[in-house]
Image (cartoon, coloured by chain):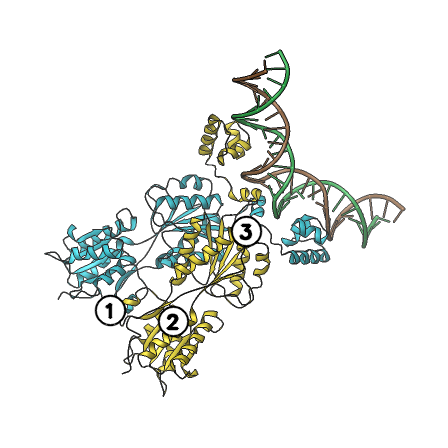
Chain colours: A cyan, B yellow, C brown, D green
Amino acid sequence: MNDVARLAGVSIKTVSRVVNDEAGVHPGTAERVLAAIEQLGFRSNVGARNLRRGSSTGTVGLILEDVANPFYSLLTRAVEEVARHHGRLVLTGSSDAEPARERDLALEFCARRVDGLLIVPTGLRHGYLVPEMRAGTPVVLLDRPAGDVVADTVLVDNIGGTAEAVRHLASFGHRRVAFLGDSPDIYTAVERLRGFREGCARAGLHYDEELVVMGPHDERSVAAALRRVLDGPNPATAVVSGNNRMTVYAVRALAHRPDRPALVGFDDFELADLLDPPVTVVAHDSAALGRAAAELLFGRLGGDSAPPRRVVLPVRLVPRGSGEVGLS
Amino acid sequence: MNDVARLAGVSIKTVSRVVNDEAGVHPGTAERVLAAIEQLGFRSNVGARNLRRGSSTGTVGLILEDVANPFYSLLTRAVEEVARHHGRLVLTGSSDAEPARERDLALEFCARRVDGLLIVPTGLRHGYLVPEMRAGTPVVLLDRPAGDVVADTVLVDNIGGTAEAVRHLASFGHRRVAFLGDSPDIYTAVERLRGFREGCARAGLHYDEELVVMGPHDERSVAAALRRVLDGPNPATAVVSGNNRMTVYAVRALAHRPDRPALVGFDDFELADLLDPPVTVVAHDSAALGRAAAELLFGRLGGDSAPPRRVVLPVRLVPRGSGEVGLS
DNA sequence: CCGCCCCCAGACAACGTTGTCATAGCGGCG
DNA sequence: CGCCGCTATGACAACGTTGTCTGGGGGCGG
């Protein structure tokens, strides 16, 4: 800016005025300044501006498990879009479901003075957020609440959705339904398991612990879990899988089995409708999740100081074929 | 920091020393300072630190078309990973294939003094990058070069891959192969079309313009394009589709056709192997693309000042079924 | 002709840090 | 006892901006 001022033969303050479109600069002067800016390729330093102004940095932080998962990448896109409408940029980070990494990312974001944080929380302890929130950084939690921190939270109806899946399968005559869930230290996994139990209870099914496997997270372990519930003496005839990854693994594992069980997956995924058979899912809109959370965040930034909200987004069962298999 | 200093009864400089783990602070003093930091929830302001130090902001910018596209979200994840190893955070933005948006994002990133930029360039004019590059911001282009700017570029072998797809189809007896490509102002679309022509030439096929459709970008227009090449008087018996989106649309459009043509898609995608028939693709590793570009960028940040490099990553044809259909 | 006001422009401080230099205190050694 | 050198600390300026205040000149009315 100094260089620009020198080149244009004005003071640095006048350059600042031109850069900020402030009124009261002689058009001729402004022209000279603009020419100098152009010539030197000057770009105002937003960091310094924010420091001086004490104003927003124009960024929000987004922390999730893994952008590579379509569920989160759709969510990310939605957040980006809302942020853009509010003139903000997005800092992203994947925690890989490691609490320490989530914490490091969040604190790093805060040190960079993001205007707000959107977090898909991992693990159980989130007390590290308290000082930041007290310091005025609004935090919105997505997809899961944080056990020990009260903040705005946007969830999907995990319990209702899983219960609905069970009801659906029971309506086709299934009495022995298995549940494959994620690790029990993940909130959504626990909720969906609860929904599963509830669904069993409502449909008058016996809840059999033998048919519940929590924790398999890769293709091999999902396949093993399926063998366990399908190859026993009293096998399941239908399966509810707890998230999009597991559903895909399950489809893969079941592809070459002669006696395929009925399958309903939690989370929709691309091409589910083109598989053979098309996969019935409990769908929810992850873009809507991101949008709702981001809107909530910007609401807070806009001055909304109502008590923390908890929003639960609806899910809906999409029958496609894999879940409408009767008993053979 | 002032408050911390006051509370600990030391000068602000001593607080700075403690925060930065500088040697030569009395342990007792350090303890008092740390206690004050804890009590006040003090978090050092990275922006101010960078301003004073004139050092890196510890961020890199990543601009691509759309994070929601799995191709880009895998890439994003790889970039995040490399950045993390180099202690950097990632600012992301989706350009939606709009040059103006790409430009705005890039300049916004530069105003925030990112250490470097990774860009999947959209459109043909990227001169706006020149001042930034001259100012010392390294730029690496991914997936496509920028017509009018010389910078490090990481590409995939578009021509070779598409030619290979044609060769593969011809080896199953196909003589009339159609090509569905993206809009011709996208570099990869043009390259793949060139690869298609080259493949036709090498396989001794007549290159028939009637069988080439460039530009369809949603489900409806892909379906229309397919009708055009399949329902004419002299129809195609095989189709090469130009990217992952189009392949998926094509699969959907072909799902209920009795006379399905052979199909090879450019870009691999999840579940391609589970469709019926499984989809043969020209696969490349988008994570490797992101990794290579990020490594290149950090190499530049590490002082590598060799002339701009152009890296071309290999592709490989993955036969799965849809491309191994002979003539009926 | 004088005084006032308006239009432009610049001087200066401050935002939150940190690098540089200065200084106070203290123990040891000749 | 005086000097040296070391340790622990602080004062100050500067990073690149911008808000506030001040000042010079010109036009206009009295």
For marks 1 and 3, give the one nearer the viewer: 3
Foreground of the two, B319 or A116:
B319
Q: Which residue is mark 1?
A: A276
Identify the amino acid type marked 2: Met
Look at the picture and state if B155 lies above or below B250: above
Cα–Cα gap, marks 3 and 2:
37 Å
Query: Marks 1 and 3: same chain?
Result: no
Q: Chain of mark 2?
A: B
Q: Which amino acid type is marked by label 1?
A: Asp
Chain for disc number 3? B
Q: In the rendering, at what x and y percent does residue B264 appear?
A: 34, 73
Local packing at callout 2 (Cα closer than 10 Å; few below 14, some 14-19, many 20+) is: many
State the SS at label 1. loop
Q: CA distance from mark 1 to mark 3?
A: 50 Å
Given the current orientation, which residue lies at the most extreme left position? A233
Q: Which residue is mark 2?
A: B246
- Chain bearing tag 1 is A
Marks 1/2: CA–CA distance: 20 Å
Instruction: Locate residue B62, reporting x and y percent.
Output: 47, 57
Q: Is residue A304 left or right of residue A286?
A: right
**Quick check: marks 1 and 3 in contact, CB under 8 Å?**
no
Residue identified by numbered label 3 = B113
Vertical order, A12 against B42 (above or below): below
Say which element carries label 2. helix
Amino acid found under the numbered disc labelled 3: Arg
